[in-house]
Amino acid sequence: MPASSAGDFSLPQEDVQVFEVTEANSTAPIAHFFLDAYSRPGEKRGGAWMSDIVGRTELAALVPAGAGCRLPAAHLVCNSAPPVRSSQSNDACTVQL
């Protein structure tokens, strides 16, 4: 589910989306997921990649004040064309036979 706001996160671009990952029957977050879907020529290398940002830990020195643990976070970076005036980009299409 999309996070209600960036909250504690400093986002590099306004089009980067933050999602809270939850268990199917819970609303408590278990991780965070960042999606940086759109290309920015001259600022971002080509291709797509995913990696972790931070892992889950209960180590007191790394846990935010008042939290029981630091939640893991990962990001997916792509280079899709941004949408144009609420239409879909041409990066993907469906072929019907």
Image: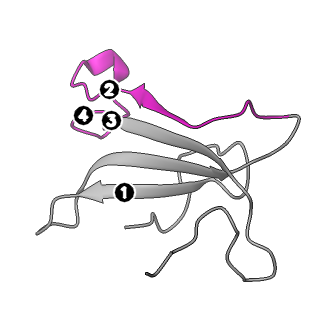
Q: Earlier in the sequence, mark 2 or mark 4?
A: 2
Measured Cα–Cα span from mark 4 to mark 1: 15 Å
How far apart are the alpha carbons under marks 1 and 2? Answer: 15 Å
Disc 3 residue crowd, few under 14, some 14–19, many 20+, Cα 10 Å: some
State the separation of the CA atoms marked 2 and 4.
10 Å
Res. 72 mark: 3
Disc on the earlier residue, 3 or 1: 1
Identify the residue at horizontal 51%, vertical 75% (top origin): 94
Q: Point out the frontmost of discs 2 and 4.
A: 2
Query: Is disc 2 placed on a helix, strand or loop?
Result: loop
What is the three-letter code of the residue carrying label 2?
Gly
- In the picture of the structure, the residue carrying the numbered disc 4 is 69
Q: Circles 3 and 2: CB distance less than 8 Å?
A: yes
Q: Which residue is mark 2?
A: 55
Provide the secondary structure element on which disc 3 rests. Answer: loop
Mark 3 or 4, closer to the camera: 3
Q: Position of residue 90 (x, y in %)?
A: 70, 68
According to the picture, the residue beneath numbered tag 1 turns out to be 20
Pointer 1: residues within 10 angstroms few (<14), some, or many (20+)? some
Q: For residue 2, what is the image quadrant?
A: bottom left
Using residue 40 as the reference point, say whether residue 29 is left or right of it.
left
Image quadrant in which the C terminus is located: bottom left
The image quadrant where one finds the N terminus is bottom left
Q: Nearer the viewer, mark 4 or mark 1?
A: 1
Q: CA distance from mark 3 to mark 1?
A: 10 Å
Magenta-tinted stretch: 43-71
Q: Amino acid at mark 4?
A: Cys
